[in-house]
Image: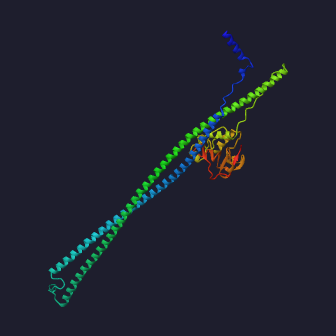
Amino acid sequence: MARWVVALVAALVLLPGSASAVPPPPPNPSDAEIGVGRREADAKAARVGELTGQLTSAEAELQRLTDDVASKMELANKARVDLETAQEAAAEAEREADAARTEADAAGRAVEDARADLDEFAAASFQQGSTIGSLSAYFGATSPEDVLARSQLLAAVGDSGLNALDDVERARSEKANKDSSARAALDLAHEKQAAADQAERDADAIRQSAVQAQQAQAGQAAAIQGDKERVEGELTRALTAVEGLEGQRAQYDQWLDDKRREDEEAARQAALNAAKPSAPAQTRPVVAPAAGGGVETVVARAMANLGVRYSWGGGNYDGPTIGIRDGGVADSYGDYYSVGFDCSGLMMYAFAGAGVYLPHYSGYQYNAGVKVPLSQAERGDMLFWGPGGGTHVALYLGDGMMVEAPYSGSSVRVAPVRYGGIMPYATRLL
């Protein structure tokens, strides 16, 4: 009996037109679940914005400290040059002082030698009776003229010795003065050398302090960057989860719509069949899927690429692509062999999701839609920088925040709107 019941149930299930042919409804997340997901994504986005602001401030402070380190390094170089100059001046003063000291010593010895010679002459003259005023000096004179000659000779010899002694004494005094001046110059040179040496130590200490401050700030900026990247990852997952829930809701709504249409068609067919039993069965009409797109689709597609690297010339309607060579900065970062987006490429991909296909140049994108004053910009509008919008483009998220692919060496990110150089109009496409 049991096997008969099972066979009967299986036959009923396989009968065409039975209830089992209707597909089951897809998951239908509740409004509460979607609301929680949206609030979590909003909180993550706000946190990303907060961290972006902190990172901007930290990077500005890091740049200031980096500049300060460069300045302190130059001051340290100046102190070293000044020290070398002072050392050379001190060495020269040392040499001059040594020379002056040698000359003074030699002059002193010359004075002593001259005095000894004069004393010896005086002693010899006295012993021989030839000193002036000694009568023995005149013994043997043959005439008054001879006496006068001897007197003049002794006076001349005495005056010559005394003059020579005066000259030597004067030279010694000059050498002593020169030695004293040289010693004073040497003391001053040593003082300048000591001051320069202290200045070098002070400059090195200041430079080291600046380097430590810069390194500490770099660590702080790196930590903020790490937190930002982590929260961006959480934001991406939250957005993906919300998108998934909203996608399930859209699929469920589509299923309801399809089921309603199918029920209406089935009722119409049943009415027709009831009126004309012999009429052939009607073919089920094809129902077009609900149209996608919209501002939130554009934003979601851009946000889904947070963290994707910047590649100059990269990106198209289907996603990130390999960049191209620019012969300069982009090449130095390897953009030409790396997959990523540049600023206009990110906009191409984001808006393609809403059926809007933009050219790969921000200047053309600037003129692709309706221009609105910057003060009236709304979520999903494009912001531009540079003449004719040809320098940079970003997608406005609202509340002073934007998503962008900024420059080589960076990645797609959420950042506060930068108003320096910004165009006075935003471009609205949706």
Residue 301 quadrant: top right
Query: Is the residue 210 above or below the residue 138 in the image?
Result: above
The mark tally for this picture is: 0
Q: Residue at x 41, y 61 (%)?
A: 85
Residue 190 x %, y %: 36, 63
Q: Is residue 275 left or right of residue 100?
A: right
In this view, the residue farthest toward the front is: 32
Res 19 seen here: yes
Direction from residue 158 to residue 216 in the image, left or right:
right
Q: Nearer the viewer, residue 303 or 277?
A: 277
315 versus 257 height, above or below: below
Image x and y of residue 156, in percent = 24, 83
Vertical placement of residue 353 versus 64, above or below: above
Position of the C terminus by quadrant: top right
Residue at the (37%, 64%) spot, across then down: 189
Picture coordinates of residue 49, whole percent (x, y):
59, 45
For residue 103, what is the image quadrant?
Answer: bottom left
Res 283 seen here: no
Picture quarter with the N terminus: top right
Quarter residue 7 falls in:
top right
Residue 84 or residue 405, whichever sits in front: 405
> Which residue is more in the foreground, 276 or 284?
276
Question: Quick one: which residue is furthest to the bottom in this view?
Answer: 144
Query: Looking at the image, is 47 positioned above or below residue 136?
Result: above
235 displayed left or right of 119: right
| Visual colour scheme | rainbow
**Residue 35 pos. (x, y %):** 64, 36
**What residue is at 46 percent from the left and 51 percent from the top?**
211
